[in-house]
Image (cartoon, rainbow, N blue to C red):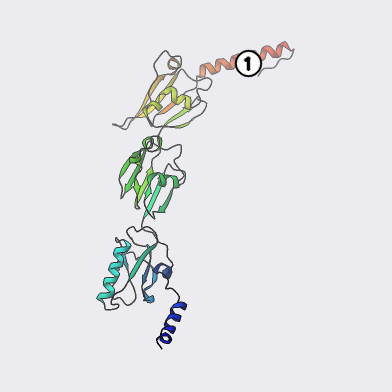
Amino acid sequence: MRALILLPIIAGSMFAQPRPSLMEEVGGANLPALQIGANDLIAISVYDAPEFTRTIRVEPDGQIHLPLLTRGIQASGLVPGTLEQAIVTELKAEDILVDPVVKVTVVEYHSRPISVMGAVRKPLTFQADGSVTLLEALARAEGLTADAGTEIIVSGTVQARIPVSGLLNNADPKLNLQLTGGEEVRVPEADKIFVVGNVKREGAFPVRDRADTSLLKILALADGLAPYASRIAYVYRRDLNSGSKLEIPIELEKIMSRKSPDVTLQAGDILYVPDNKNRRSMMNVIDRVTSFGVSTASGVLIWR
């Protein structure tokens, strides 16, 4: 007789389906348990209470609202485990459930932006779904451009000025900051020296340290002097105290022939190499005389 009574129980247990886990009920992703913020998407599951099992977005004021609860629950600033306890407390306080079992997971973070901008190849803003290093953030921006300066400025929840050479060239691990969201990474462009006039390549050339600012090095970046460059060049510089513009003559020919020491330029300087008009006129006369001689030798008089 006892065997007949136990048989239905055994049979029922054999065919009973296992209860899905709380994560399977809500079907959400389980991202790292960081602090929840406004607009984050969270998954809530309450054991044996499907009416509370749902995916919900945290409201701009940081609260969430669940059915049957008369007041909202503050979610912003809490980690998922702490929010679970807050939901349990509210369900008990309003006599909705006696001993609820609550699970909270984060599906999407929208409150943890990291912005990377400035002299990077691909400025972007992305959500930190965990701890992100400064190098990882720069890698997402596809690295620095050729115009990048000497520092990386981090502001927001982390405040720092990071030397580029120390982070990238020296690989100092102390400079590779941990970012958790809410930071802005800005890479300012390097200061520039502008070169115009009788050079082979005019342009603005970045300077990152004092060794980059000598006149000869800047001329090398400009591919050297063009023909008929004047013996004297001019540097135009703004006086930081008065704001006025200064014109500084440079003995270019003496520096090029090593009769005078090299000159150090400053960031923001404009180096102007004028045209040597007298020399150009003389060369034009020589060219014309040469052409005249070649033409008369052939019996044809051509004046160019």
Q: Which amino acid, by three-letter code, is at mark 1?
A: Arg
Tag 1 secondary structure: helix
Residue ranking furthest to the bottom: 1
Q: Position of residue 83 (x, y in %)?
A: 30, 65
Residue sitting nearer the eye, 150 or 18: 18
Res 171 quadrant in image: top left
Q: Position of residue 108 (x, y in %)?
A: 40, 61
Q: Residue at x 42, y 44 (%)?
A: 138
Position above or below: 134 against 229: below
Q: Which residue is mark 1?
A: 288
Position above or below: 249 against 61: above
Residue ranking furthest to the left: 93
| Residue 211 makes an appearance in the image | yes
Q: Is residue 286 left or right of residue 133?
A: right
| Residue 72 makes an appearance in the image | no
Q: Position of residue 230 (x, y in %)?
A: 48, 19
Q: Position of residue 269 (x, y in %)?
A: 39, 29
Residue ranking furthest to the right: 299
Q: Is residue 303 left or right of residue 105?
A: right
Tell me the quarter of the image containing the C terminus. Answer: top right
Tell me the quarter of the image containing the N terminus. Answer: bottom left
Residue sitting nearer the eye, 1 or 230: 1
Classify 10 Å Cα crowding around label 1: few (below 14), some (14-19), many (20 and above). Answer: some
User: How many dots with numbers?
Assistant: 1
Q: Is residue 175 left or right of residue 143?
A: left
